[in-house]
Amino acid sequence: MSIIEAMKALQPLLERYHQYKNDKTITGNERQVGQSLIEPFIRQVLHWETEKPSQFRVEYPQNGKRMDYLVRYESISQFIIEAKKITRDIFGDEEAYKQAIRYARGKEKDFAIVTNFKQVVVLRCDRDIHPLQAEIAKFDLVAASDADLQIILYFEGSLVNRFNS
């Protein structure tokens, strides 16, 4: 997907975000943010089929905990996404980073994404370093640059499918 196509796919989600950004019953509810913004982002911008269990799992169990999203290709784990409510500032949130890294390592994955939709953080999880040092990219999706979108598009389903073919 090109940057222009990604921006076009993202636009309706940004409009939804702006429509509800001051409604704390939505922005303060992690599950609602996931359902209304994060899952559509994964489906419409990153092109993962969120309805297919072979590609996408919600609240996937691991060691007595539940990771928010496990993204898969042909039933093989690719990366995890840890969702947070919009009202939580995730930039530099050590606890959120630790949680995502723990889940990714449990699935032997190199990358994790932490997002509240507005903010996106990409973590490298294959090194034994302090969680804050695992941050390889972070950006505000509402004001994302082309370079920011290019980073997140590395996690696009069609790109992963090409590499695994």
Image: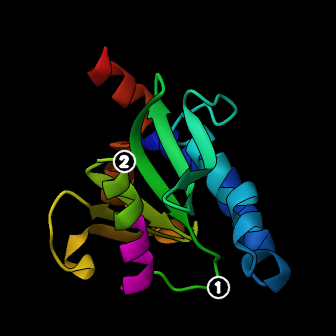
Number of the label disc, if any, that sits on residue 107: 2
Q: Earlier in the sequence, mark 2 or mark 1?
A: 1
**Residue that badge 1 annotates:** 87
Q: Position of residue 94 (x, y in %)?
A: 36, 85
Where residue 127 appears, as percent x and y from the top left, is 15, 63
Question: Which image quarter holds the C terminus?
Answer: top left
What percent of the width, then of the height, locates residue 30? 69, 71
Q: Is residue 64 left or right of residue 129?
A: right
Picture residue at 72% right of the left edge, 71% below the top: 18
The N terminus - image quarter? top left
- Residue 104, horizontal then vertical, whole percent: 36, 55
Element marked by disc 1: loop
Q: Is residue 96 one of those drawn in magenta?
A: yes
Note whether residue 6 is visible. yes
For residue 150, the mark is: none
Query: The disc labelled 1 sits on which kind of residue?
Result: Thr
- Tell me, yes or no, whether the highlighted magenta stretch contains residue 97: yes
**Residue range corresponding to the magenta coloring:** 91-100
